[in-house]
Image (cartoon, coloured by chain):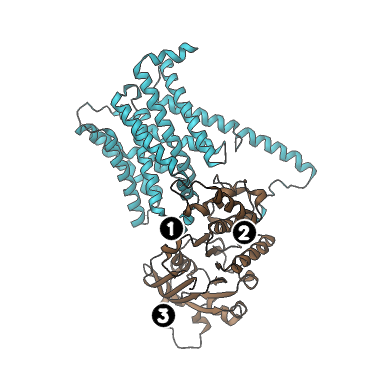
Chain colours: A cyan, B brown
Amino acid sequence: MIDLILEPLQYSFMTRALLVSLVAAVTCALLSVWLVQIGWSLMGDAVSHAVLPGVVIAYLIGWPFAIGAFVFGVGAVALIGGIQSTTRIKADAAIGVVFTALFALGVVLISRTPSSVDLSHILFGNVLGTSAADLVQVLVIGSLTVAVLLVKRRDLTLFAFDPAHAHALGLSVRGLRALLLGMLALTVVTALQAVGIILVVAMLITPGATVVLLSRRFDRMLLLAVLITAASAVAGVYASYHLDIATGGSIVLAQAVAFLLAFLFGPRGGMLARLRGRRRARASTTGASAGAASARTDGVVP
Amino acid sequence: MSAVQITELTVHYGEVLALTGVDLRLEEGRVIGLLGTNGAGKSTLFNAVMGLVAPTRGRVEVLGGSSLAARQRGLVAFVPQSERIDTDFPVSVRDVVAMGRYGRLGVTRRLRAADRAAVDAAIARVGLTELADRQIGDLSGGQRKRAFVARGIAQDARLLLLDEPFAGVDVTSQALITRLLHELRDEGRTVLISTHDLAGVPALCDEVVLLHHRVVFQGDPAEALAPERLALAFVGPDVADAAHAPDPRPAQLRGDGPAPSEARDAGPAHPLDRTEEPA
């Protein structure tokens, strides 16, 4: 058993892979909780895909891929916001148009560049090929993002819950929105190396969705998201080593398993909890009049 | 100093005129009801006080300064209408009330002992101590409304804006909230309520402003509710003044203009907007 754990760590590429995956997991997990609560999952999808041309261009001119990715991530957000505020087009359509256009631009760029750019590495990640420089880059950007998210967490939650109150306090709602979207772009950059463009979106949505089934306290949800996603990352990397499967896919699958467990056994809306609740409700209705939903009676008047 | 001083306020949304030439002075220490039909400009006026719309013309002063200055000093609290609250959001009553203190806290918004005491006191004042750690969605509509009023108390706001406070609230809670708002008024705070629920007005308000793109009446609630006054706001001055000369105002203002959806406030839709008659 110990061997199974220690054996991969003899290789420096495996320790680097593990570290990069953990940093990506923690960063994504935190941000994910806000994204899911606000209903910005599709925005996460958009930004992660839209960075493709940025990554390709950065490779071509020999800059760190993070810079290209960040520029295009922020650019995509600005474009989506611009289309929404100047036309009658709804958010989902604006998002769809912008991110597919940018993703297509990336695909076209790759088709015209020398073979030094490996499309599959960008799309599906190349965690086993993480260089020492990549690791430093991910560590720096990841810690910066996590630090900002933690320091501003109460403001971000206020923005997510009641932007009108944030405005009433004289805070800049637009500024908070920009901050969260900027953090989204940085988070995508952090996770690219580990899981690639296609699967980043899983890291941005699944943790936040999983903890909805486990808790109703924001701080606890943040903690649970980090723990579960970090554990999934470790499990994914080890499974990838021992079973010889794709690392990015393996990490995301591990997260999906965590979600499934929460879905089946979670105390908040899990299937088992629901079945048990139904059985209890049925037992009680035989005696008294149906009084299951008593707490909210005056809250549902249309 | 007046709580709100509006001078010659005109607000257009593109082609649509929401407010025109509104002059309004609201004194401190009163409960004031803002009444009017959908699209009469209630939400626009609220938004102007909140600094959410830029006036096409005119000026809005809140507690002696700009709206932004008043908000940054923590003087303005907003109690949203029930439908605008995400009841699935993972926050407790205590979390919500604590948000009232954020304006006076440091960058991480960490509560100090004094802030926690203020939050507890505000929760106790609205009678939710037992429910303080409940999730906001577990509360009834009336309890939830009290939680948001408690947030305004924790904030120590001088001006409280309530948007349709009695929509989705049972009669018992309504009486409780009315009493609470009167207490706040007696402390010198100003409570401005936007509503088209006429039934609750006499018991609640010291003063009523009837709005129909402009102020058609300001004064005593009993007077405001007289049929000929109400007609001004709820049927439109043009119908009420049918005997007079042709109305020179733009079509949107006469009530025979574009479809209601066009002439409607750009503000958020209200649940009661779906019905024709006020509840």
**Label 3 vs label 1: CA separation?**
36 Å
Q: Position of residue A292 (x, y in %)?
A: 70, 45
- Give whichever of A172, B202 is nearer the camera: A172
Q: Tell me, for residue B249, which label it has, or none.
A: 3
Foreground residue, B227 or A226? A226
Near mark 3 (Cα within 10 A), the count class, few <14, some 14-19 or many ≥20, is: few
Apparent side of residue B162 relative to residue A26 in the rendered image (left or right): right
Quadrant hosting residue A281 = top right
State the residue position of label 2.
Answer: B168
Disc 2/disc 1 C-alpha distance (Å): 29 Å
Depth check, front residue: B110 or B218: B110
**Quadrant housing residue B171:** bottom right
Circle 1 sits in a helix, a strand or a loop, which is it?
A: loop
Amino acid of disc 1: Gly
Q: Chain of mark 1?
A: A
Residue B101 in the image: state x and y as whole percent: 51, 53
* Amino acid type of the residue that numbered disc 2 sits on in the rendered structure: Gly
Q: Amino acid at mark 3?
A: Arg
Q: Is residue B149 above or below residue A121?
A: below
The residue under label 1 is: A170
Work out how far the residue at label 2 is from the one at label 3, CA to CA, in angstroms: 36 Å
Label 2 crowd bin: few (<14), some (14–19), many (20+), radius 10 Å: many
Name which residue lies at 61% across and 63% down. B166
Locate residue B150, reporting x and y percent.
Answer: 59, 57
- Asked whether, in this view, residue A137 is left or right of residue B187, the answer is left
Instruction: Kindly identify the residue that appears in the image at 29 percent across and 38 percent down.
Output: A104
Q: Look at discs 2 and 3 and give the one toward the viewer.
A: 2
Say which chain tag 2 marks.
B
Q: Residue A294, image x and y in percent?
A: 70, 49
Residue B271 is left or right of residue B262, and the answer is right
Q: Is residue B84 shown to the viewer in this render?
A: yes
What's the chain of the residue with tag 3? B
